[in-house]
Image (cartoon, rainbow, N blue to C red):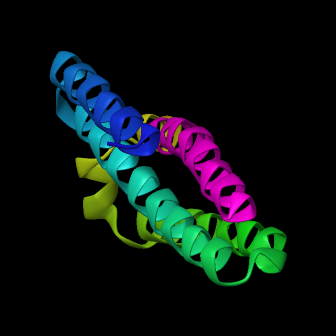
Amino acid sequence: MTLTTLSTLAGLAAALALAAALGGAEGTGVLAGFLAGAAVTGACLLRQRRVLRAAPSRALRSMIEGFLVKLGAVVVVVLAFVLFPVVRELLDVRSFFLAFAGSILLVLFAGTYDNARVLRERRAE
């Protein structure tokens, strides 16, 4: 298991525990925010890992693209909160975005470490 997988699972366990403790819209916001942030960040890291293996010179470009994808995800979620009142009733906005940001940081730091290891192994070959 990679550090990314372990940290994501640990973060998910913490998000589940916090969601159960908070309950209601706040708890649902924490869980949804963590899952959304981890999914978007995980997808960006997977793409970056593929780029590192195929063309390491494009590493910085893939990092910038990942940032833009995460920014786009925030815009889409904000629009969902603004346009759909049902979403606002089911999820607390603050807890969603705090969990979203926390999961991005958690998964991104671990994933960047794993991707750097992939790049070091490629250079050693």
Give how far across and how far down residue 46 sits, in percent. Answer: 49, 68
Give how far across and how far down residue 110 sits, in percent. Answer: 55, 39
**Residue at x 51% of width, y 71% of height:** 79
Vertical relation: 31 (above or below) 43: above
Query: Which of the 4 image quarters holds residue 19?
Result: top left
Vertical relation: 71 (above or below) 113: below
Give how far across and how far down residue 64 sits, in percent. Answer: 78, 69
Front position in the image: 17 or 118: 118
**Residue at x 73% of width, y 66% of height:** 63
Give how far across and how far down residue 122 sits, in percent. Answer: 67, 64
Q: Which residues are magenta?
A: 99-125
**Residue at x 48% of width, y 45% of height:** 100
- The quadrant the N terminus occupies is top left
Examine the structure image and report whether residue 100 is included in the region drawn in magenta: yes
In this picture, residue 94 sits left or right of residue 23: right
Front position in the image: 89 or 95: 95
